[in-house]
Image (spheres, grey):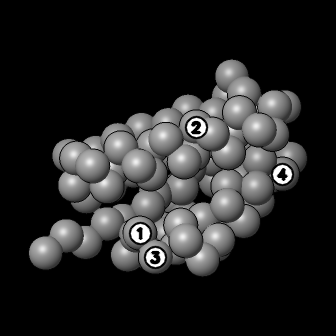
Amino acid sequence: MKLKLDLHDVYNRGDEIDRQLRAVIDEAVQKKAKLVEIIPGKGSGQLKKRVLRFLQQKEIKALYHRVEKDSDNFGRVFIHFRWK
C-alpha cells in the first residue's frame, strides 16, 4: 500500500503543512503502509526543507524506516516503513 500527500495547496500555511504531514504518517502507521509519497513541489526548495525537518523530529523519526529523496524528481520525497 502506498499513500500520497500533495502539499501544493497548503504551501504557505505552516500549521496546516505540519497537520497534514502528521495525518499521513498516522494513517501509514494505522494501515501499515509500506510507502508514503510526499509532494512538496519543486519551487524554491523551502517546502521540501520544511518536510525534511518535520521528518527529523525524534517522535516522527521513530515511526519510519528511511527517507528517500527522488533522484529523478526534486519535488518528491518517499518515506519507507518496515513492518514486522
| Residue drawn 71% across the image and 33% down it | 16
CB under 8 Å between callouts 1 and 4? no
CB under 8 Å between callouts 2 and 4? no
Cα–Cα gap, marks 3 and 4: 24 Å
- Nearest the eye: 39 or 13: 13
Instruction: Identify the secondary structure beneath mark 1.
Output: loop
Disc on res. 46: 4
Instruction: Identify the secondary structure beneath mark 4.
Output: helix
Q: Nearer the viewer, mark 1 or mark 4?
A: 1
Answer above or below: position of 81 versus 24: below
Kind of residue sitting beneath label 1: Leu
How many C-alpha atoms fall within 10 Å of the one at disc 4: few (<14), some, or many (≥20)?
few
Cα–Cα gap, marks 2 and 3: 18 Å
Disc on res. 19: none
Kind of residue sitting beneath label 2: Gln
**Residue at mark 1:** 63
Disc on res. 20: 2
How many C-alpha atoms fall within 10 Å of the one at disc 3: few (<14), some, or many (≥20)?
few
Disc on res. 62: 3
In the image, taking residue 36 as reference, residue 12 lies left or right, namely: right
Cα–Cα gap, marks 1 and 2: 16 Å
Cα–Cα gap, marks 2 and 4: 17 Å
**Is residue 73 in view?**
no
Answer above or below: position of 34 versus 30: below
How many C-alpha atoms fall within 10 Å of the one at disc 2: few (<14), some, or many (≥20)?
some
